[in-house]
Every structure is written in C-alpha cells, then in structure tokens.
Image: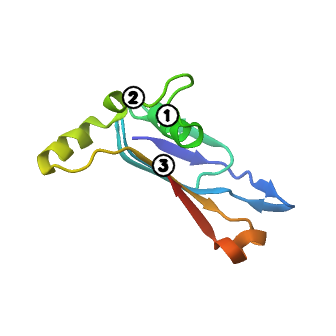
Amino acid sequence: MVRLRRSNLGLRWWGAAMQLIKKIEISYLRSLHKAVIDSPGDLNLLFGRNDSGKSNVLRGLSLFFNGVTEPGRDLDFALDFSDIRRKEVKAVKGKQFISVRVDFNVPSNYRRSLGDTVSLKR
C-alpha cells in the first residue's frame, strides 16, 4: 500500500494560494493495478514497506511528464505492464494498456474558457 501525507503549504499563483494538481491516477504500471492519489499538496511524502509500489508511483509520474519511466530508459511494455492485469486480460481477452491520468485545477482567470478542472491521460 502506498501512503501519502499532505502538507499544508500552498502553491502561489498570482498572489492566491492554489493547488495545481487535483488528482493522480495510475493504472496497470508494474505492481500498481490502480493507484489513486487525491488532492496531493505542494510537498508530499511517499512511504511504505519494501515492494509496496512507491517507486512505481514515481515511474508513473515520470512517464506522464517526461515520456520515460526512468531517466534514459523508455517504456518497456513487457517489463512495465502489470502482471495482475496481464492475467486478467488473458482471461477475458481484453486490451493491454498502461495509463496515467492527472487532473489539474484551472487558475481562476482561465476557468471561464476551460472550466474548473482539466484532465490529461497518457
């Protein structure tokens, strides 16, 4: 289990406190079947037992923001796809995919055209 602690530090955006990332969802990446982090703060602490998925959360964020799971190493689907999901897919003949979705809070001066939240999925 991955645990997340939220700090009470606020991101400054044009003079007002704002939390830019609203939610992170990582599906089928290595040991993560589905990991959801709601309302991460500015400063987060990821801790847990060995082999609980902490590094895989970081790999998922790296894949989303940088297009690679680790510096200097592209996504290797055979290695990075969840073993649990691989077994499910074989049983129902479903699609194999890894997904990382991040929901962003939209700054107030852009909400009129974009709405309150923008979601990106890779």
- Mark 3 or mark 1: name the one nearer the start of the chain: 1
In the drawing, does residue 77 fall left or right of residue 107?
A: left
Tell me the amino acid under the disc marked 1: Arg
Q: Categorize mark 1 by other alpha carbons within 10 Å: few (<14), some (14-19), many (20+).
A: many
Image location of residue 98, percent across then percent down: 38, 44
- Which residue sits furthest bottom? 112
Q: Give the Cα distance between marks 1 and 2.
A: 12 Å
Image location of residue 62, percent across then percent down: 55, 36
Which residue in the structure is indicated by mark 2?
A: 76
Residue positioned 45% across, 34% down in the render = 56
User: Helix, strand or loop at disc 3?
Assistant: loop
Q: Are marks 1 and 2 in contact (CB under 8 Å)?
A: no
Which residue in the structure is indicated by mark 1?
A: 59
User: Helix, strand or loop at disc 1?
Assistant: helix
In the drawing, does residue 40 fall left or right of residue 84?
A: right
Residue positioned 59% across, 52% down in the render = 40
Residue positioned 81% across, 55% down in the render = 12
